[in-house]
Amino acid sequence: MANYTAADVKKLRELTGAGMMDCKKALDEADGNVDSAVEFLRVKGQKGVAKREGRSAENGAVVSLISEDKTSGVLLELKCETDFVAKGEKFQSVANTLAAHVAATSPADLEALLASEIEAGKTVQAYVDEANANLGEKIVLDRFAQFTGGYVAAYMHRTMPDLPPQVGVLVELDKEDAQVAKDVAQHIAAFAPKYLNRDEVPAETVENERRVAEATSREEGKPEAALPKIVEGRVNGFFKEVVVLEQAFAKDNKKSVQKVLDEAGVTLKRFARIKVGI
């Protein structure tokens, strides 16, 4: 089997607009070399590859869909090349249709989503390819989130008034609290935390931060005896930057997000944040 990663598949999809399975087959044939895989797709006549090669899909929209009972929700990013297409009704209709499909089918991952049937005899990948042709731009679907089980809410942020939302946040609480859900989702949109709690931070990431903190402290000439305390302080500072529960709350920086949740008597079970192109 050829040696390539999910990142290579994503890169090839963005370069060519080809479907995921086509990209995997091309990488298999090209022994994992992305440039050779692009050539393989062109030789095989993959529709639109030559035209889309090198073009970037960094505009687009984030859409959300919350069930009537607020117990499930979907967040989905659909990318295109220009803001002109992004703010068009047809593009946004495609994005909303895809979100509704996710809500109805609960795919396990992106590969399962793209392979699922959205219309009789038509997969999601074929539906996206059709949007490519109809809209005249490379259209890319490569991220979505779906929560089910608790109280689910979404916050959508427009960076420009004439564009669709460019940032979307999905949160799940253990019980209903619309105001806290909104406040926390807005906080997440603004401060872009990466993790829910310390347990979610990979051990190697923490160890790397610890090494950097120690090396920086030594470079600054800190006393050897004080190093352990200084390093721990800097690692804790890192947690306060990337862990949402430890961040200073956007609306009251004297409180942590955890404190706000505790005062409301609710628990943040999980969250997802998507910003177009990032």
Image (tube, rainbow, N blue to C red):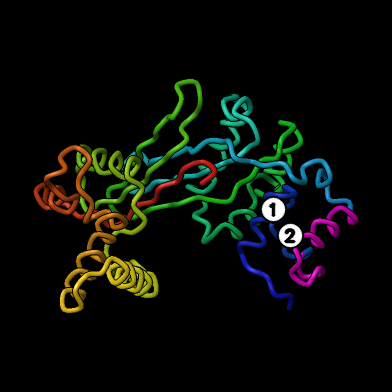
The image quarter containing residue 245 is bottom left
Q: Quadrant of residue 161?
A: top left
> Picture quarter containing residue 254?
top left
Disc 2: which residue: 23
Q: Residue at x 21, y 56 (%)?
A: 246
Nearest the eye: 115 or 40: 40
Q: Looking at the image, which is closer to me, 136 or 276?
A: 276
Q: Earlier in the sequence, mark 2 or mark 1?
A: 1
Magenta stretch, residue numbers: 27-44
- The N terminus lies in quadrant: bottom right
Q: Secondary structure at mark 2?
A: helix
Dot 2 surroundings within 10 Å: few (below 14), some, or many (20 or more)? many
Image position, residue 125 (x, y; %):
68, 50
Element at label 1: helix
Note whether 174 is above or below 209 in the view shown: above
Name the residue that disc number 1 marks: 13
Residue at x 24% of width, y 70% of height: 231
Residue 34, placed above or below residue 67: below
Residue 32 within the segment the image draws in magenta? yes
Instruction: Look at 60% across and 47% down and name the residue there.
Output: 141
The secondary structure making up most of the magenta span is helix
Badge 2 amino acid: Cys
The reply to whether callout 2 and callout 1 are in contact (CB within 8 Å) is yes
